[in-house]
Image: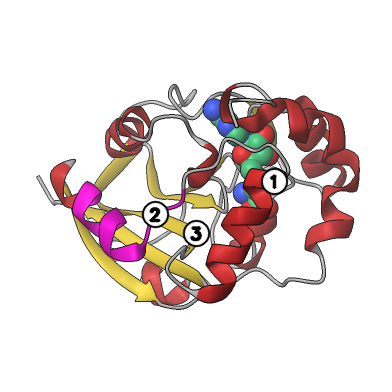
Amino acid sequence: MARRYGRGDVQFFERFGWVYDLATNPVPPVSLDPALVFAERPIDRVLDIAGGTGRATEPLLDTAEIVPVIDAASTMCQRARLHGRISIRGDVENFPVSNDAVDAVVIGDALHHLPTVSHFFDEAARVLAPGGVLLIEEIDPSTALGNLIAAGEDLMGFDSRFFTPERLCTILTDTGFEPRIAVSGVRYLVAGRVSVR
Ligand SMILES: C[S@@+](CC[C@H](N)C(=O)[O-])C[C@H]1O[C@@H](n2cnc3c(N)ncnc32)[C@H](O)[C@@H]1O
């Protein structure tokens, strides 16, 4: 099914952002710690990209200094602000952040919505300081439940494209990151470290 909700399925989140928390609250965010230990620098400045209402980076609020949420859907940004988060409307292919500005970039449950991932990886590499990490939380389509979720998103008209953790590691290597699978399972976590230049 082709792009029923526009690029990145953003129109869907624009329309239903106000109930997003109701749907996701029963699922607690995964701990990002097993991936953060892969960083070769302290994690003080974090970007939550395609961050929606800020769910994925909630566990970092106690330890990191700055954790803004960037999302293309204004409804999701408004919800993030209601949770007390700094939220900026923006696109994954062009972060409003200077080079080497952050220690970690997090993208939770959103990579599969992007029509192309290469620009996103280039942007993540640009804004990450040497030794920083890109953290990707995703659904593994090779698991039974992951396959069911992928089929459900297709039925709903999403333009989703899911990656296995192994495939994501290959893409990360090809785009200059050093990858590691930090958590396996239906909901997995992969880290990509940018080398210390
Ligand atoms: C399933 S939600 C995930 C939100 C949040 N990261 C979480 O873990 O709950 C996917 C999000 O990706 C955002 N999104 C999709 N394409 C985008 C793009 N090109 N730039 C920025 N955000 C995008 C949507 O607006 C939506 O908020």
Q: State which tag comes first along the sequence, 3 or 1.
A: 3
Q: Is residue 33 visible?
A: yes
- The image's mark for residue 155 is 1
Residue nearest the viewer, comparing 1 with 16: 1
2 or 3: tag closer to the N-terminus: 3
Q: Report which residue position mark 3 lands on.
A: 138
What coloring was used for the rendering?
Answer: secondary structure
The residue singled out by tag 2 in the image is 163
Q: Nearer the viewer, residue 129 or 133?
A: 133
Q: Is residue 32 left or right of residue 145?
A: left
**Which of the 4 image quadrants contains residue 100?**
top left
The reply to whether callout 2 and callout 3 are in contact (CB within 8 Å) is yes
Residues at marks 1 and 2, CA–CA distance in whole angstroms: 18 Å
Depth check, mark 2 against mark 3: the one in front is 2
Give the magenta part as a residue range: 162-172
Q: Residue at x 47, y 26 (%)?
A: 95
Reply above or below: 107 against 95.
below
Q: Position of residue 68 (x, y in %)?
A: 61, 41
Label 3 element class: strand
* Residue neighbourhood size for the residue with mark 3, other residues' Cα within 10 Å, grouped as few (<14), some (14–19), many (≥20): many
In the displayed structure, 185 sits above or below 102; it is below
